[in-house]
Image (cartoon, rainbow, N blue to C red):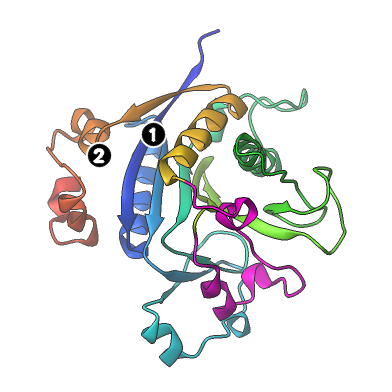
Amino acid sequence: MAKLLISLLQLGTLDYATGLRLQEKLIALRKEGRIGDVLLLLEHTPVITLGRNAQAKNILGSAETLAQRGVEVFECDRGGDVTFHGPGQLVAYPIFDLRGFPSDNSNRKSLGVVEYVRRLEEVLIRACADFRIPAKRILGLTGVWTGGDARPSTISNESKIAALGVHISRGVTSHGIALNVNTDLSFFKLIVPCGIESKPVTSMAKELSRSVPLQDVAHALSRNFGGVFGSQILWLDSLDALLAGTLGVPMKPPENLRKLRGEDDPAWA
Protein backbone atom coordinates (compact mmCIF):
# COMPACT_ATOMS: atom_id res chain seq x y z
CA MET A 1 0.00 0.00 0.00
CA ALA A 2 1.34 3.44 -0.95
CA LYS A 3 2.44 5.71 1.86
CA LEU A 4 0.35 8.72 2.80
CA LEU A 5 1.78 12.11 1.84
CA ILE A 6 2.24 15.09 4.17
CA SER A 7 3.31 18.42 2.66
CA LEU A 8 5.67 20.31 4.97
CA LEU A 9 6.05 24.07 4.90
CA GLN A 10 8.64 25.88 7.02
CA LEU A 11 7.60 29.49 7.52
CA GLY A 12 10.27 31.12 9.69
CA THR A 13 9.03 33.51 12.39
CA LEU A 14 5.39 34.65 12.47
CA ASP A 15 3.34 36.61 14.96
CA TYR A 16 0.60 34.49 16.50
CA ALA A 17 -2.31 36.24 14.78
CA THR A 18 -0.81 35.56 11.35
CA GLY A 19 -0.14 31.93 12.22
CA LEU A 20 -3.69 31.50 13.49
CA ARG A 21 -5.20 33.02 10.38
CA LEU A 22 -3.08 30.80 8.16
CA GLN A 23 -4.27 27.74 10.07
CA GLU A 24 -7.89 28.80 9.67
CA LYS A 25 -7.52 29.15 5.90
CA LEU A 26 -5.75 25.82 5.52
CA ILE A 27 -8.29 24.04 7.75
CA ALA A 28 -11.12 25.27 5.52
CA LEU A 29 -9.29 24.08 2.41
CA ARG A 30 -8.51 20.70 3.99
CA LYS A 31 -12.16 20.19 4.97
CA GLU A 32 -13.15 20.92 1.38
CA GLY A 33 -10.57 18.43 0.10
CA ARG A 34 -8.81 21.16 -1.89
CA ILE A 35 -5.46 20.44 -0.26
CA GLY A 36 -3.95 17.35 1.33
CA ASP A 37 -2.45 16.96 4.80
CA VAL A 38 -0.08 19.78 5.72
CA LEU A 39 2.52 20.24 8.45
CA LEU A 40 3.59 23.80 9.29
CA LEU A 41 6.91 24.41 11.09
CA LEU A 42 7.61 27.86 12.46
CA GLU A 43 8.65 30.08 15.34
CA HIS A 44 6.41 32.69 16.95
CA THR A 45 7.22 36.13 18.22
CA PRO A 46 6.71 36.18 22.04
CA VAL A 47 3.13 35.30 22.94
CA ILE A 48 1.15 33.77 25.78
CA THR A 49 -1.79 31.68 24.61
CA LEU A 50 -4.78 30.55 26.64
CA GLY A 51 -6.47 27.31 25.65
CA ARG A 52 -10.08 26.33 26.25
CA ASN A 53 -9.35 25.27 29.84
CA ALA A 54 -7.10 28.21 30.71
CA GLN A 55 -7.41 30.22 33.91
CA ALA A 56 -6.42 33.88 33.81
CA LYS A 57 -4.71 33.53 37.21
CA ASN A 58 -2.04 31.39 35.51
CA ILE A 59 -0.68 34.51 33.82
CA LEU A 60 1.67 35.83 36.51
CA GLY A 61 3.21 38.78 34.68
CA SER A 62 1.51 42.16 34.92
CA ALA A 63 0.29 43.92 31.79
CA GLU A 64 3.21 46.34 32.16
CA THR A 65 5.76 43.52 32.37
CA LEU A 66 4.29 41.76 29.35
CA ALA A 67 4.40 44.99 27.36
CA GLN A 68 8.01 45.65 28.38
CA ARG A 69 9.03 42.20 27.18
CA GLY A 70 6.98 42.43 23.99
CA VAL A 71 4.68 39.55 24.87
CA GLU A 72 1.20 39.39 23.31
CA VAL A 73 -1.71 37.47 24.84
CA PHE A 74 -4.21 35.44 22.80
CA GLU A 75 -7.14 33.19 23.58
CA CYS A 76 -7.53 30.22 21.24
CA ASP A 77 -9.62 27.08 20.79
CA ARG A 78 -6.94 24.47 21.44
CA GLY A 79 -7.11 22.20 24.46
CA GLY A 80 -5.05 22.90 27.54
CA ASP A 81 -4.25 25.83 29.78
CA VAL A 82 -1.68 28.62 29.47
CA THR A 83 1.55 28.32 27.49
CA PHE A 84 4.26 30.47 25.95
CA HIS A 85 5.61 30.58 22.40
CA GLY A 86 8.66 32.54 21.36
CA PRO A 87 11.96 32.63 19.49
CA GLY A 88 14.08 29.50 19.79
CA GLN A 89 11.00 27.30 20.17
CA LEU A 90 10.00 25.14 17.22
CA VAL A 91 6.23 24.96 16.73
CA ALA A 92 4.56 22.34 14.54
CA TYR A 93 0.96 22.74 13.36
CA PRO A 94 -0.40 19.60 11.65
CA ILE A 95 -3.44 20.24 9.46
CA PHE A 96 -4.40 16.57 9.10
CA ASP A 97 -7.64 14.82 8.24
CA LEU A 98 -7.51 12.01 10.79
CA ARG A 99 -9.96 9.93 8.76
CA GLY A 100 -7.13 9.26 6.32
CA PHE A 101 -4.78 7.77 8.92
CA PRO A 102 -5.35 4.14 9.90
CA SER A 103 -5.63 3.40 13.60
CA ASP A 104 -3.50 0.89 15.51
CA ASN A 105 -6.70 -0.09 17.32
CA SER A 106 -8.43 -2.98 15.56
CA ASN A 107 -11.79 -1.59 16.69
CA ARG A 108 -11.28 1.67 14.80
CA LYS A 109 -10.73 2.42 11.12
CA SER A 110 -9.04 5.79 11.62
CA LEU A 111 -7.19 7.73 14.30
CA GLY A 112 -9.11 8.90 17.34
CA VAL A 113 -8.26 11.97 19.41
CA VAL A 114 -6.34 10.17 22.18
CA GLU A 115 -4.36 8.07 19.72
CA TYR A 116 -3.52 11.22 17.73
CA VAL A 117 -2.23 12.99 20.85
CA ARG A 118 -0.14 9.95 21.81
CA ARG A 119 1.39 9.96 18.33
CA LEU A 120 2.31 13.64 18.62
CA GLU A 121 4.02 12.86 21.92
CA GLU A 122 5.85 9.99 20.25
CA VAL A 123 7.13 12.32 17.53
CA LEU A 124 8.57 14.59 20.22
CA ILE A 125 10.08 11.73 22.24
CA ARG A 126 11.82 10.34 19.15
CA ALA A 127 13.04 13.78 18.07
CA CYS A 128 14.58 14.36 21.50
CA ALA A 129 16.17 10.91 21.35
CA ASP A 130 17.84 11.89 18.07
CA PHE A 131 19.79 14.43 20.13
CA ARG A 132 20.40 11.95 22.96
CA ILE A 133 17.91 13.65 25.25
CA PRO A 134 15.83 11.02 27.10
CA ALA A 135 12.20 12.14 27.10
CA LYS A 136 8.92 10.56 28.15
CA ARG A 137 5.26 10.94 28.94
CA ILE A 138 3.90 11.43 32.45
CA LEU A 139 0.73 9.56 33.36
CA GLY A 140 -2.26 11.87 33.55
CA LEU A 141 -0.51 14.81 31.85
CA THR A 142 -0.12 15.91 28.24
CA GLY A 143 3.25 16.83 26.75
CA VAL A 144 6.80 15.50 26.88
CA TRP A 145 9.18 15.59 29.83
CA THR A 146 12.81 14.99 30.74
CA GLY A 147 14.16 13.58 33.99
CA GLY A 148 14.59 10.06 35.33
CA ASP A 149 14.37 7.21 32.87
CA ALA A 150 12.27 7.14 29.72
CA ARG A 151 9.34 5.21 31.20
CA PRO A 152 6.00 6.92 31.93
CA SER A 153 6.11 8.15 35.51
CA THR A 154 4.33 10.12 38.21
CA ILE A 155 7.56 11.26 39.91
CA SER A 156 7.77 15.00 40.51
CA ASN A 157 11.35 15.73 39.40
CA GLU A 158 10.74 15.98 35.66
CA SER A 159 10.99 19.10 33.51
CA LYS A 160 8.71 19.86 30.57
CA ILE A 161 10.54 20.17 27.26
CA ALA A 162 7.54 20.22 24.91
CA ALA A 163 3.92 21.33 25.17
CA LEU A 164 0.94 19.98 23.25
CA GLY A 165 -2.53 21.35 22.59
CA VAL A 166 -4.84 20.45 19.72
CA HIS A 167 -8.22 21.22 18.24
CA ILE A 168 -10.16 18.86 15.99
CA SER A 169 -13.15 19.85 13.87
CA ARG A 170 -14.89 17.43 11.47
CA GLY A 171 -11.85 15.19 11.71
CA VAL A 172 -9.36 17.94 10.76
CA THR A 173 -6.66 18.91 13.25
CA SER A 174 -5.15 22.27 14.13
CA HIS A 175 -2.74 23.75 16.68
CA GLY A 176 -0.17 21.14 17.74
CA ILE A 177 3.18 20.95 19.49
CA ALA A 178 5.89 23.32 20.73
CA LEU A 179 9.41 22.05 21.42
CA ASN A 180 11.77 24.24 23.45
CA VAL A 181 15.04 24.23 21.53
CA ASN A 182 16.99 27.40 22.37
CA THR A 183 14.08 29.16 24.08
CA ASP A 184 14.70 31.90 26.66
CA LEU A 185 13.18 30.05 29.62
CA SER A 186 12.80 33.23 31.67
CA PHE A 187 9.61 33.91 29.70
CA PHE A 188 7.98 30.93 31.42
CA LYS A 189 8.26 32.79 34.74
CA LEU A 190 5.47 35.02 33.43
CA ILE A 191 3.00 32.10 33.56
CA VAL A 192 2.17 28.87 35.33
CA PRO A 193 3.03 26.66 32.33
CA CYS A 194 0.03 24.50 31.43
CA GLY A 195 -1.33 25.27 34.91
CA ILE A 196 1.22 22.93 36.53
CA GLU A 197 3.05 24.67 39.37
CA SER A 198 5.17 21.74 40.58
CA LYS A 199 7.21 21.08 37.43
CA PRO A 200 9.82 23.35 35.79
CA VAL A 201 10.33 23.93 32.07
CA THR A 202 13.50 23.02 30.20
CA SER A 203 14.92 23.20 26.68
CA MET A 204 17.15 21.15 24.45
CA ALA A 205 19.87 23.78 24.86
CA LYS A 206 19.66 23.52 28.65
CA GLU A 207 19.72 19.73 28.62
CA LEU A 208 22.73 19.63 26.28
CA SER A 209 24.52 22.73 27.65
CA ARG A 210 24.84 24.11 24.13
CA SER A 211 22.83 25.84 21.47
CA VAL A 212 21.09 23.50 19.00
CA PRO A 213 20.66 24.41 15.30
CA LEU A 214 16.93 24.88 14.82
CA GLN A 215 17.10 23.49 11.29
CA ASP A 216 18.55 20.23 12.62
CA VAL A 217 15.55 19.93 14.94
CA ALA A 218 13.17 20.76 12.08
CA HIS A 219 14.59 17.85 10.10
CA ALA A 220 14.32 15.55 13.13
CA LEU A 221 10.66 16.48 13.62
CA SER A 222 9.98 15.98 9.91
CA ARG A 223 11.63 12.57 9.89
CA ASN A 224 9.75 11.41 12.97
CA PHE A 225 6.37 12.74 11.79
CA GLY A 226 6.92 10.58 8.71
CA GLY A 227 7.78 7.53 10.79
CA VAL A 228 5.08 7.86 13.43
CA PHE A 229 2.30 8.72 10.97
CA GLY A 230 3.46 6.24 8.31
CA SER A 231 3.78 9.00 5.74
CA GLN A 232 6.13 10.42 3.18
CA ILE A 233 7.11 14.03 3.93
CA LEU A 234 7.28 16.43 0.99
CA TRP A 235 9.16 19.66 1.80
CA LEU A 236 7.71 22.64 -0.08
CA ASP A 237 9.61 25.82 -0.87
CA SER A 238 6.75 28.25 -0.35
CA LEU A 239 3.11 28.73 0.48
CA ASP A 240 2.67 29.36 -3.22
CA ALA A 241 3.75 25.79 -3.94
CA LEU A 242 0.99 24.52 -1.65
CA LEU A 243 -1.77 26.85 -2.81
CA ALA A 244 -1.10 27.82 -6.42
CA GLY A 245 -2.68 24.72 -7.90
CA THR A 246 -5.68 25.05 -5.62
CA LEU A 247 -6.35 28.76 -5.73
CA GLY A 248 -4.57 29.89 -8.87
CA VAL A 249 -3.13 32.87 -7.02
CA PRO A 250 0.63 33.53 -6.89
CA MET A 251 1.70 34.10 -3.30
CA LYS A 252 5.25 34.01 -2.03
CA PRO A 253 5.98 34.32 1.70
CA PRO A 254 7.26 35.72 3.88
CA GLU A 255 6.61 39.22 2.53
CA ASN A 256 3.10 38.38 1.42
CA LEU A 257 2.07 36.66 4.64
CA ARG A 258 0.66 40.07 5.57
CA LYS A 259 -2.24 39.10 3.34
CA LEU A 260 -3.34 36.62 5.97
CA ARG A 261 -4.22 39.53 8.25
CA GLY A 262 -6.91 40.66 5.86
CA GLU A 263 -4.95 43.33 4.05
CA ASP A 264 -5.49 41.51 0.77
CA ASP A 265 -8.00 38.81 1.56
CA PRO A 266 -9.22 38.32 -2.04
CA ALA A 267 -6.07 36.22 -2.53
CA TRP A 268 -7.92 33.53 -0.60
CA ALA A 269 -11.18 33.72 -2.55
Label 2 sits on what residue type?
Answer: Leu
Q: Position of residue 81 (x, y in %)?
A: 62, 68
Label 1 sits on what residue type?
Answer: Leu
Mark-to-mark CA distance, 1 and 2 = 10 Å
Q: Residue at x 36, y 78 (%)?
A: 70
Q: Residue at x 39, y 55 (%)?
A: 43
The reply to whether residue 224 is in sight is yes
Q: Is residue 210 magenta?
A: yes
Secondary structure state at the residue bearing disc 2: helix
Labels 1 and 2 touching (C-beta < 8 A)? no
Residue that extends furthest to the front in the rendered view of this protein: 209
Dot label at residue 64: none
Q: Position of residue 157 (x, y in %)?
A: 81, 63
Label 2 CA crowd tier, 10 Å (few <14, some 14–19, many 20+): some
Q: Quadrant of the N terminus?
A: top right
Q: Residue at x 51, y 15 (%)?
A: 3
User: In terms of sequence position, does the residue under pointer 1 or pointer 2 come before the other?
Assistant: 1
Secondary structure state at the residue bearing disc 1: strand
100 or 256: nearer the viewer: 256
Q: Position of residue 202 (x, y in %)?
A: 63, 61
Q: Is residue 142 magenta?
A: no
Label 1 CA crowd tier, 10 Å (few <14, some 14–19, many 20+): many
Where are the magenta residues, as a range?
A: 183-212
Q: Residue at x 62, y 63 (%)?
A: 80
- Residue position for label 2: 239
Q: Position of residue 161 (x, y in %)?
A: 63, 55
| Side of 34 where 76 appears, left or right | right
- 113 to 227, vertically: above or below: below
| Side of 220 where 70 appears, left or right | left
Dot label at residue 8: 1
142 or 237: nearer the viewer: 237
